[in-house]
């Protein structure tokens, strides 16, 4: 687990925990209220550093995800070896491991999903209504945490059709409905507040279900390159031949569980995979972690079938050894990836100080990492009085966190790139307001990568002079003010 400050979305999460923000000012789709309620509560109760607490909650949620998954496996495998192997494959999978080392809400989402799956299977196996109530409670909490929880709803439709003749009593259904409302209540309350603020049901629903990634959510363009990325992500998470028995395990599962449970799991995985394959966002690989729960489940059942046919102790050793191949593969992966031509690379090519991209993305561990805080402190030390620093969302978080927590360099304006307003700055940093800052040599930017700069700063009228970790913005002589 990372001990302190991080970049990007993780850094934003740490700031929200520090400031006690239960919702996101941009949109409801980014509220993730249960995760922040737990993290903020723990931060205020213990007085521990907010960044560390935000990381800790994500790590604990990842650990509970693995524990729930092990419980789910006990419904389908009869031997200890496939149970241990399947659990180890998920525990050491790249994406879940990486997300569990920093402030990420996705592990809270997988925690809810893994419990929901285990509870549904428990209900279909034992027919105890309490498991159905707990399953829909987990789905409600999961939806309050992340919209990915909605992707199991098609599977519930299939389940209702298949179980219609054995449907629970009206009383149980009422309890289940109440449980779901309790779980979803944080998001429902925020949605009502958003409606009062916007005065539009349509805009509220857009904020709740789509947000600013509407084009990505409804993307239907799936190219061969995109499919190749899916395969690469899968190999990165499971660099072991054991994953190859997943299709057999999926088919074998039909004989090991009630038919409705098999259909529930199959439809759920299909919907999760279909959504994520065409959800083309920069961190697309992180959203596959939900589908990986099903993939590893099927692989573990397949391993159980292999051991059924060949019950050899040597094979046990082989299975257990190959279930733990992840860490050594991740350790050597950066060196291998650096030798791949840039035209074939699937990792972001952009370099950030104290964050070498291959190591950062391919090695999931963050133990002892302090690069983000080191960068922020060195930048503050280098900037002149009353400077303005233009940064994108990825790099801004550590500086904002230190300003809010420690009061470091309050004279430095770091405009919030997510909003049009620059509240908290001594002026608006745009083309009109930048003239005086440039004349006084007080305008800087953290990167010259075009996508990290506002449009007006990409016009060619400005030059960027390297001054260490940042760049001083000056006006090009061919473009007078």
Image: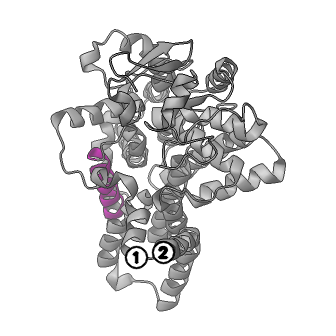
Location of residue 57 with respect to 208 vertically, above or below:
above
> Where residue 33 sits in the image (x, y, percent)?
59, 60
Residue 4: mark in rendering: none
**Residue position for label 2:** 195
Q: Main secondary structure of the magenta part?
A: helix
Residue shown at 23%/32% (left/top)?
Answer: 228
Q: Secondary structure at mark 1?
A: helix
Cα distance between the residues tagged 2 and 1: 6 Å
> Where residue 380 sits in the image (x, y, percent)?
67, 24
Residue shown at 48%/34% (left/top)?
Answer: 392
Would residue 317 be seen by someone viewing this image from the given angle?
yes
Q: Secondary structure at mark 2?
A: helix
Which sits in the foreground, 417 or 62?
417
Q: Quadrant of residue 52?
A: top right
Location of residue 298 with respect to 166 vertically, above or below:
above
Horizontal side, residue 202 vs residue 319: left or right: left
**Residue position for label 1:** 201
Residue span colored magenta:
263-278
Q: Earlier in the sequence, mark 2 or mark 1?
A: 2
Would residue 88 be seen by someone viewing this image from the given angle?
no
Q: Residue at the front extreme?
A: 480
Residue shown at 42%/49% (left/top)?
Answer: 290
Question: Quick check: is 456 in the magenta stretch?
Answer: no
């Amino acid at each position: 687990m990372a001990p302190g400050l991080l970049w990007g979305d993780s850094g934003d999460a740490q700031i929200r925990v520090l400031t006690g923000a239960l919702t996101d000012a941009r949109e409801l789709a980014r509220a993730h209220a249960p995760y922040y309620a737990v993290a903020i509560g723990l931060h205020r109760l213990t007085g521990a550093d907010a960044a560390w607490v935000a990381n800790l909650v994500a790590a604990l949620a990842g650990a509970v995800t693995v524990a729930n998954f092990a419980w789910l496996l006990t419904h389908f495998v009869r031997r200890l070896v496939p149970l241990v192997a399947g659990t180890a494959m998920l525990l050491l999978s790249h994406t879940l491991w990486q997300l569990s080392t920093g402030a990420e809400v996705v592990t809270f989402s997988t925690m809810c999903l893994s419990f929901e799956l285990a509870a549904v299977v428990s209900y279909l196996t034992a027919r105890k209504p309490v498991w159905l109530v707990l399953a829909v409670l987990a789905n409600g909490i999961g939806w309050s945490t992340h919209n990915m929880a909605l992707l199991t709803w098609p599977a519930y439709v299939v389940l209702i059709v298949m179980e219609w003749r054995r449907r629970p009593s009206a009383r149980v259904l009422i309890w289940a409905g109440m449980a779901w409302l309790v779980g979803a209540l944080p998001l429902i309350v925020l949605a009502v507040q958003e409606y009062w603020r916007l005065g539009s049901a349509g805009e509220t629903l857009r904020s709740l279900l789509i947000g600013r990634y509407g084009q990505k959510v409804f993307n239907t363009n799936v190219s061969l390159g995109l499919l190749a990325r899916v395969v690469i992500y899968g190999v990165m998470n499971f660099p072991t031949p054991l994953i190859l028995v997943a299709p057999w395990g999926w088919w074998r599962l039909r004989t090991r569980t009630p038919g409705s449970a098999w259909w529930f799991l199959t439809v759920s995985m299909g919907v999760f995979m279909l959504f994520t394959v065409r959800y083309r966002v920069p961190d697309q690989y992180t959203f596959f972690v939900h589908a990986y729960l099903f993939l590893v489940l099927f692989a573990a059942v397949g391993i159980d079938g292999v051991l059924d046919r060949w019950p050899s102790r040597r094979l046990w050793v082989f299975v257990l050894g190959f279930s733990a191949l992840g860490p050594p593969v991740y350790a050597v992966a950066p060196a291998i990836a650096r030798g791949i031509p840039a035209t074939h690379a699937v990792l972001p090519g952009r370099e950030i100080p104290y964050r070498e991209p291959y190591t950062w993305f391919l090695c999931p561990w963050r133990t002892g990492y302090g690069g983000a805080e080191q960068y922020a402190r060195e930048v503050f030390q280098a900037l002149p009085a009353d400077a303005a620093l233009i940064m994108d969302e990825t790099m801004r978080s550590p500086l904002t966190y230190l300003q809010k927590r420690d009061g470091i360099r309050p004279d430095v304006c770091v405009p919030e790139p997510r909003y049009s307003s620059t509240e908290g700055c001594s002026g608006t940093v745009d083309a009109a307001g930048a003239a005086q800052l440039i004349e006084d040599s007080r305008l800087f930017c953290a990167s010259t990568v075009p996508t990290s700069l506002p449009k007006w700063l990409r016009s060619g009228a400005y030059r960027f002079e390297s001054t260490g970790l940042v760049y001083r913005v000056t006006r090009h002589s061919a473009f007078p003010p």
